[in-house]
């Protein structure tokens, strides 16, 4: 079926540039994306929210404060207002080691702009953020990707922590490969209902839970660590594979962890430093 083919297409290891090469430059700006593409990443990871006037905006947080000089929720601003904000200077203050004057005044971007710039030079790994805030996000996103020819070209994965969001996308277009994001932290019982809650490490998940995901998704995207403590292990990856699911783990920035996960058979990694991951891969 369609899902088996999608899994087949993703058999090779995938380097996923988390918010672009966001360890080197301000996340979700041209600086971070250009660097990721130059470093040879397979995918640009984009978190998307929606502006008040319905544009899909590449930004991680629901609110503007952390990564821009604006204030309040993204959804309360029109695109024209969002385009006046400085989305780069915060990075120089937060990461003096990687600071660059060129980052000052970097602009927020729409998904349209990103797709227009890179076309088929890279693939896109898009996360539907806070879908409960944006009832139209899924349909707007799928229409856009179809119109750009990216679904047909196999150039896109859609990911979410929200199962309803992924199931809606699957209903709209079953040809889009989907990844169910998972979040494990101490106290979470690992059940389907408690994915975003708190559980004992390492993560426990039943075959039934994996099978429920395998009905609509090609894989799972679990966190690797919580507060420095590793929450997935080799058996988690093997169990996912036994249930026909790929494993793309986030967010891995040190090379020892990259090697560990590759040894365990992980299928892809989200990293803020695609250059470090490419180095590890070149060594193997
Ligand atoms: O999308 C994978 C990972 O990015 C999920 O966490 O908070 O960085 O979007 P977050
Ligand atoms: Ca993300």
Image (tube, rainbow, N blue to C red):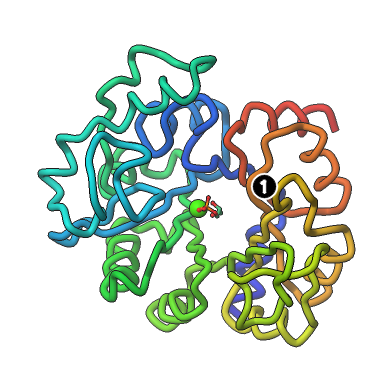
* Vertical side of 44 occupied by 25: above or below: above
Q: Which residue is mark 1?
A: 269
Is residue 174 or residue 126 the one in the foreground? 126
Classify the position of the C terminus by image quarter: top right
Q: Residue at x 37, y 40 (%)?
A: 66
Could you say where residue 133 lies in the image, as x and y percent from the top left? 30, 70
Mark 1 residue crowding within 10 angstroms, few (<14) / some (14–19) / many (20+): many
Is residue 116 or residue 187 the one in the foreground? 187
Q: Residue at x 42, y 44 (%)?
A: 120
* Vertical side of 119 occupied by 136: above or below: below
Could you say where residue 89 lies in the image, as x and y percent from the top left? 33, 24
Q: Tell which residue pokes out farthest to the front in this image.
A: 187
The reply, left or right, for residue 78 in relation to residue 216 is left
* Vertical side of 96 occupied by 212: above or below: below
Secondary structure, mark 1, is strand
* Vertical side of 88 occupied by 178: above or below: below
Residue 70 picture quarter: top left
């Amino acid at each position: 079926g369609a899902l088996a083919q999608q899994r087949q297409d993703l058999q090779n290891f995938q380097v996923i540039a988390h918010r672009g090469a966001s360890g080197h430059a301000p996340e979700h700006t041209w600086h971070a994306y250009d660097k990721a593409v130059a470093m040879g990443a397979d995918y640009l990871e984009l978190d998307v929210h929606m502006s008040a006037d319905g544009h899909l905006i590449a930004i991680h947080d629901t609110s503007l404060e952390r990564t821009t000089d604006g204030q309040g929720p993204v959804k309360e601003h029109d695109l024209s207002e969002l385009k006046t904000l400085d989305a780069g200077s915060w990075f120089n203050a937060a990461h003096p080691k990687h600071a660059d004057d060129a980052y000052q005044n970097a602009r927020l971007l729409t998904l349209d702009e990103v797709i227009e710039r890179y076309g088929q030079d890279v693939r896109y790994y898009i996360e539907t953020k806070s879908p409960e805030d944006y009832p139209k996000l899924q349909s707007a996103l799928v229409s856009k990707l179809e119109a750009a020819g990216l679904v047909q070209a196999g150039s896109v994965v859609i990911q979410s922590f929200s199962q309803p969001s992924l199931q809606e996308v699957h209903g709209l277009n079953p040809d889009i490969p989907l990844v169910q994001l998972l979040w494990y932290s101490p106290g979470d019982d690992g059940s389907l209902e408690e994915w975003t809650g708190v559980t004992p490490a390492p993560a426990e998940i039943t075959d039934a839970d994996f099978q429920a995901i395998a009905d609509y998704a090609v894989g799972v995207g679990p966190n690797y660590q919580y507060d420095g403590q590793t929450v997935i292990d080799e058996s988690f990856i093997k169990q996912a594979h036994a249930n026909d699911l790929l494993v793309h783990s986030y967010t891995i920035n040190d090379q020892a962890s990259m090697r560990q996960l590759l040894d365990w058979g992980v299928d892809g990694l989200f990293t803020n430093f695609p250059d470090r991951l490419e180095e590890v891969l070149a060594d193997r």
